[in-house]
Image: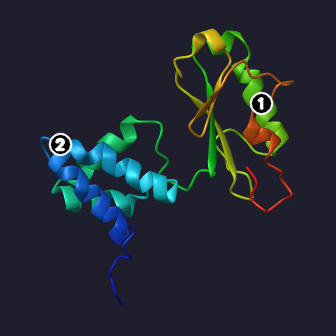
Amino acid sequence: MSTATTKILTDEMVAEIKAFLPRYPSKQAVTLPALHIVNDKLRYVPLQAVVEIAEILELAPAQVQDTLSFYGYFKQDKPHGEVRAWVCRSIACALRGADELVEHMCHEAGIKPGECTPNGKLTIEFGECLGACEMAPCVLEGEVLVADVTHEKPTRCLLNTNKDDDRGEV
């Protein structure tokens, strides 16, 4: 019986991580960029990737895991949707209906907060302050900030995500 573990990081990911090494004062400082590289490619950071990042950076896996677990941004159990809709839950957004907005968006998408649509296109979840209180409630849709979101003015990702459509339009 083989105990070899299948590698998660591709040669391309390893090269991208190593390219950061000369730009930082220590290998440990490359931990966060390395996590972002893996997350960008896989849409999550599985435990085996943590171990492999630690090997590249000559750190204990616990050190990489500490950084990963500090940020709510990284999922570790399964990939998030191709588009992640982060609904701000700061006080301004909460007062302007963020909780109800998440409930509505999840209902429309047919999922619960933190889940991914069956076609893998969308994950809806709460995010910490997005720094746009004057536009509350707001949603970070991938890398695009959407302001003043309401039931009547949904985000693009919700409008373009068809629960029954696997063509992948988001």
Whether residue 25 is visible, yes or no, is yes
Whether tag 2 and tag 1 are in contact, CB under 8 A, the answer is no
Q: Residue at x 47, y 58 (%)?
A: 41
Relative to 98, does residue 119 appear above or below in the rendering?
below
Q: Residue at x 32, y 51 (%)?
A: 34
Q: Residue at x 79, y 48 (%)?
A: 161
Amino acid at pointer 1: Glu
Q: Is residue 63 left or right of residue 58?
A: right
Residue 90, percent across and down?
57, 16
Q: Residue furthest left?
A: 25
Q: Which of pointers 2 and 1 lies earlier in the amino acid sequence?
A: 2
Report which residue position mark 1 lands on: 103
Whether residue 65 is visible, yes or no, is no
Q: Which structural element holds mark 1?
A: helix
As rendered, which of 25 and 119 lies closer to the eye?
25
Q: Which structural element holds mark 2?
A: loop
Estimate how packed mark 2 is, as few (under 14), some (14 to 19) or many (20 or more) residues with alpha carbons within 10 Å.
few
As rendered, which of 87 and 169 lies closer to the eye?
169
Occupied quadrant, residue 28: top left
Residue 9, percent across and down?
37, 66
Occupied quadrant, residue 18: bottom left
Q: Residue furthest bottom?
A: 1
Q: Which mark is residue 24?
A: 2
Relative to 152, does residue 51 appear above or below in the rendering?
below
Residue 162, percent across and down?
83, 51
| Between marks 2 and 1 in the image, the one whose residue lies nearer the viewer | 2
The residues bearing labels 2 and 1 have C-alpha atoms spaced at a distance of 42 Å
Amino acid at pointer 2: Tyr
Q: Which mark is residue 49?
A: none
